[in-house]
Image (cartoon, grey):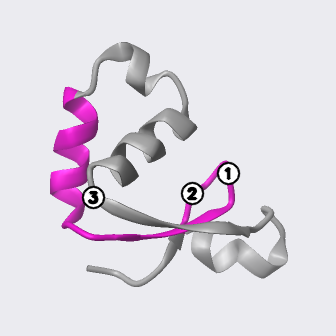
């Protein structure tokens, strides 16, 4: 599993606790109302232990985070 990553549109730092395929499967199975926003998806992933979100650590989409957005 890769190291820390950032939510593309929220700038919130997180790490995967499971492989990406398991995360993708989980998200596909969420009901529509739980997939209505990146916030809802990230909250569900965190609540179910699939990712760890580092509270209070945000970033913006500027030159400093360009490598995390690829």
Q: Please name which of the two marks, 1 or 3, marks the residue nearer to the observer.
A: 3
Which of the marked residues, 2 or 3, is nearer the chain's N terminus? Answer: 2
Do the residues bearing badges 1 and 2 touch, measured as CB atoms within 8 Å? yes
Q: Which residue is mark 1?
A: 10
Region in magenta = 6-29
Q: Position of residue 53 (x, y in %)?
A: 50, 64
Please tell me which residue is depicted at 24% across the width and 46% down the height of the picture: 24
Q: Position of residue 34 (x, y in %)?
A: 40, 24
Question: Farthest residue toward the bottom?
Answer: 3
The quarter of the image holding the C terminus is bottom right
Q: Which residue is mark 3?
A: 50
The quarter of the picture where residue 20 lies is: bottom left
Return the residue nearer the eye: 68 or 55.
55
Disc 1 from disc 3: Cα separation: 18 Å
Q: For the residue labelled by badge 3, is the local secondary structure a helix, a strand or a loop?
A: loop
Up-down: is 44 above or below 60?
above
């Amino acid at each position: 599993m890769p190291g820390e990553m950032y939510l593309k549109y929220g700038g919130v730092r997180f790490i995967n606790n499971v492989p990406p395929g398991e995360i993708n499967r989980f998200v596909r199975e969420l009901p529509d109302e739980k997939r209505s926003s990146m916030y809802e998806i990230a909250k569900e992933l965190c609540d179910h232990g699939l990712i760890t979100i580092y509270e209070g650590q945000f970033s913006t989409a500027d030159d400093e985070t360009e490598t995390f957005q690829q």
